[in-house]
Amino acid sequence: MKPQSNDDTELPAAQAPKRPSGVKVVSAYLQRAIETGAYSQGERLPAERQLAQTFNTARSTVRRALDKLEEAGLVSRRLGSGTFVGAAPQSGGSLLDFIGGLTPLDLIDARAAVEPFTARLAAEHADAGMIEDLEGVLENAGATRDQDDFSKWDGEFHLLLAQASANPFLIHVFRQINHVRLNAQWGEMKANILMPDAIAEYNRQHRAVLDAIESRDPLLAQKRMAEHLETARNDLLKALNP
């Protein structure tokens, strides 16, 4: 397959799946296409919107599938240009290793310093497709009281906000944060914090953030995110000091 320079890059038609696909199916299909040479090193993959149409799935599902491929070093993503076969060049120490060494309190304090402005940027830059994806994530988060499921959708919500900010550094950082939240230490915190009342409150606060973004009110989005993270920080302190 030859590289394409526009969004009309196509999947190998003979192998394209016909049923609605989840993250595992999309990532496995694309990985197989890369490993079998359907896409060559440096070639751009189809645009997220086209992949979502091809797999009959949401763009947020495609993004999570691409996250998995990026973590595996199979693709790299360049803001404004697309997703390309091959890992991005690395230099210095691993950001993932550094973030992984932080305590939960260290990380929530860092997020409180950065995420409110991320929400502000999202209110300025989020397009209709991104807002639709955020609405879908909130719908899924609101439909569950399971800690693991909510944690997944919570992480997806915050990552999508970073993507909506259109800032490549913030996007990269929040991908690493979501990965770190899968480790054992964070699992213990999740079990102590994500009680039904807390999940309901976080859902309410997420809705307030998204309402501000949809209203194109950057300062209100920033304020609502700051309030949300203050709640999360207080809940974390209670879990650390029962």
Image (tube, grey):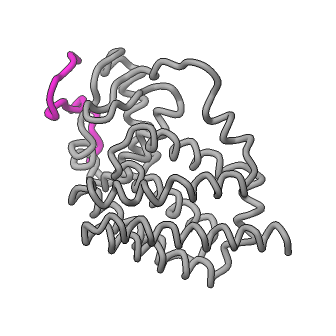
Q: Position of residue 91 (x, y in %)?
A: 56, 18
Q: Quadrant of the N terminus?
A: top left
On the image, which quarter does residue 201 sit in? bottom right
Location of residue 192 with respect to 67 vertically, above or below: below
Q: Position of residue 220 (x, y in %)?
A: 37, 71
Q: Nearer the viewer, residue 50 or 187?
A: 187
Q: Position of residue 128 (x, y in %)?
A: 21, 60
Residue 185 appears left or right of 225:
right
Q: Nearer the viewer, residue 37 or 147?
A: 147
Q: Nearer the viewer, residue 190 or 126?
A: 126
- The residue positioned farthest toward the right in the image shown: 242
Q: Quadrant of the C terminus?
A: bottom right
Location of residue 51 with respect to 154 vertically, above or below: above
Q: Position of residue 30 (x, y in %)?
A: 37, 33
Total labels: the figure holds 0
Name the magenta segment's main secondary structure: loop
Q: Residue at x 37, y 48 (%)?
A: 163
Location of residue 34 with respect to 28 vertically, above or below: above
Magenta run includes residue 5: yes
Residue 182 appears left or right of 103:
left
Q: Residue at x 47, y 32 (%)?
A: 70
* Magenta residue span: 1-18
Magenta run includes residue 225: no
Residue 95 appears left or right of 126:
right
Q: Residue at x 42, y 20 (%)?
A: 86
